[in-house]
Amino acid sequence: MDPILLTQFFISGIMISVLYILMAIGITFIYSIMKMINWAMGEFYMIGGYLQYLLVTAIFGVQYWFIALPIAMFSTFIIGVGFQRILLKPMFLGGIERRDDYATIVTIALMVLLRNLAVVIGGPYIYSTPDYFPPVHLGPLPVNGSRFVAFISAFIILIIFYIIVKKTWIGLAFQATAQNRIGVEAIGINPLKIDQLTFGIGVALAAAAGALLAPVFLVYPESGSISTMKGFEIIVIGGLGSIPGAVVGGFLLGMVETLGSVFINPSFRDIYGFLLLMLILAIKPVGLFGEKVRVA
Amino acid sequence: MGIKTYISSIPILLLLIALPHFLSSYMIHLAIISYYYVILAVCWNLLAGYTGQFSLAQHAFAAIGAYTAALLAVHLNIHPIFGIASGGLVATGWSLLIGRLVLKMRAIYLALATWAFAESSRLFIAMEYEWTRGDLGLPIPFNMMLYGPKALTPYHYYYTMLIMMVSILLIIYKIINSKIGLFARSIREDEVAARMMGVDVVKVKLFIFSITGLFSGLAGGLYAHYMGLLSPSLISFYEMAIIIIMVIIGGFGTFWGPIIGAPFIYILSEMTRAYGEIRMVVFAAVVIIIIRFFNRGLTGLPLLFKRLLPILRPR
């Protein structure tokens, strides 16, 4: 196999996996604080893509995509907080038996609702955002410009997220809430407020992935489904609720996909992740970085 | 419970047996597909509503059964009965494999793994076009279908699907009212407590997961022979979503809920097909309202009336 071609495959694999890591961290962040999986994650990805498309084509123009990105993220943040207040907050106020069932069903219904609403509003069309950036050359290798800037921006967003969670006061509050919801009430943190922020930030990360990948994978009502599947696979591989696990799992998934599509068959690219997931579940069921949780 | 329920369901059964003689063939088609969805919805309800295990691959098991039956018929000329049976077996095999890996973990892992499984198998079937013809769709030749060319009217398939549905409902009714059903409900309420009381949690979950896989696979196999044309859209997430919608609107965690909900939602969505995607938006909104405020669905309507009557009646 041609080494240059192989490197190119690897570079594009790594670049895309950073975007999937963005999705996975959104999912795992919401899980670790609210103890629920947001199944509608892909739909917030889709909303991010649509908003970015609208902002870029109607208002700013392609060269200012980096201004549109935070606006799309912030709008999705607001939408997410709204949904959290209406639908998910009652989970923690009592009055809902069997919280897990409730969260699963509500977010799946939300997913169906948003997908079809996208068809009703935007039509069943595929919108293509123009490329953000001309092709870049990394040494001898040409790289698609949009993929490159998506990679760089996702990397920057991840670093900002990391700094917020690890170094700031609000980040400590997030960590504390993830550890013990009742404990944080005793030290003056309102977990319901933290939940709102968490859900908003989690879906904003998904929206960022959607907005950044808008020129690569295009914008259509079901655009989120493959990225969401990758996100779920990554968090199972890396361990539920673990941020380093999501990062390592994401790169591992990217590697396996690249190796699989180079050496086996490129059309099954999106399936190798599932095989990796089965393998990890067979060897280390809690995931690479997961800890065994005491149930009682 | 018991003998009374059986006797009271005999008139309904007679009505269903007589039904095709009063309906147009299009209505019979709707009935057949409704029965298919009843099987899937009842299976999912047994899994999620009674055992608390959220599988998101019920449609994938049905599609695997369907594709197995169709592929065996198309490529190997195997008799349809064996094709449908092996469709059920292949679906059981997959559910056993996934169940063994995942069911000893927390419930959320099952949902994640089955979601990934469903999406991956859809992509696999779409991409493996040499065998499955991918998005072009896989037609079963006329002479290889279950009733062959003589089944130009759907009567044969109506009665076959009816028999399959009734026997699956009977088995599931038996399971729910047996010791295993009791174990399943104890797992739903509190898994740790159930284990403390000596319930072999993993075994019960695995049994229920694989038996629902078997039933879905069988239903899928029969569906393949009835429709005669399969496509990967059988595993699109809408299929799973509509099963969930049927169960929730019918009545989550009740025996009759999915049996009422599946035909209701399916026929309603066929009747309102002209309105396009907006009907799915409405269904999803109804599901959210039901699960938020009153999680008994259609089967809870009499109860709701009883509760509302004192408020509405003038004093």
Image (tube, coloured by chain):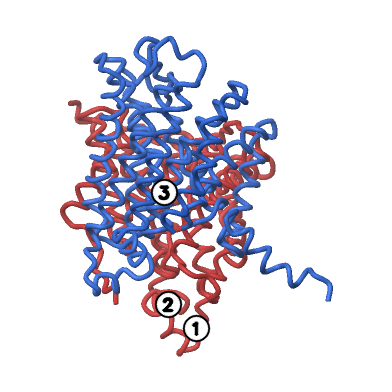
Out of B50 and A277, give the one closest to the viewer: B50
Q: Is residue A241 left or right of residue A50?
A: left
The image quadrant that residue B62 belongs to is: top left
Q: Return the chain for callout 1.
A: A
Q: Quick check: can you spot residue B20?
A: yes
Out of A83 and B121, give the one closest to the viewer: B121
Crowd rating for badge 1 (residues with CA inside 10 Å; few <14, some 14–19, many 20+): some
Q: Earlier in the sequence, mark 2 or mark 1?
A: 2
The percent coordinates of residue A10 (x first, y second) are 27, 38
Residue kind at label 1, given as amino acid type = Ile
Q: Give the residue number, with chain letter if any, for mark 1.
A: A189
Q: Are marks 2 and 1 in contact (CB under 8 Å)?
A: yes
The percent coordinates of residue A32 (x first, y second) are 39, 67
Residue kind at label 3, given as amino acid type = Trp
**Residue at the image point whose x is 51% and y is 64% from the top:** A199
The percent coordinates of residue A296 (x first, y second) are 29, 77
User: Tag 2, which secondary structure?
Assistant: helix
> Is residue A243 placed above or below B256 in the rendered structure?
below
The lab-note entry on whether marks 2 and 1 share a chain reads yes
Q: Give the residue number, with chain letter if any, for mark 2.
A: A177
The percent coordinates of residue B238 (x first, y second) are 50, 40
Q: Which chain is blue?
A: B
User: Tag 1, which secondary structure?
Assistant: loop
Q: CA distance from mark 3 to mark 1?
A: 39 Å
Q: Give the residue number, with chain letter if any, for mark 3.
A: B44
> Is residue B56 placed above or below A289 in the rendered structure?
above
User: Tag 3, which secondary structure?
Assistant: helix
Crowd rating for badge 3 (residues with CA inside 10 Å; few <14, some 14–19, many 20+): many
Hue used for the chain lettered A? red
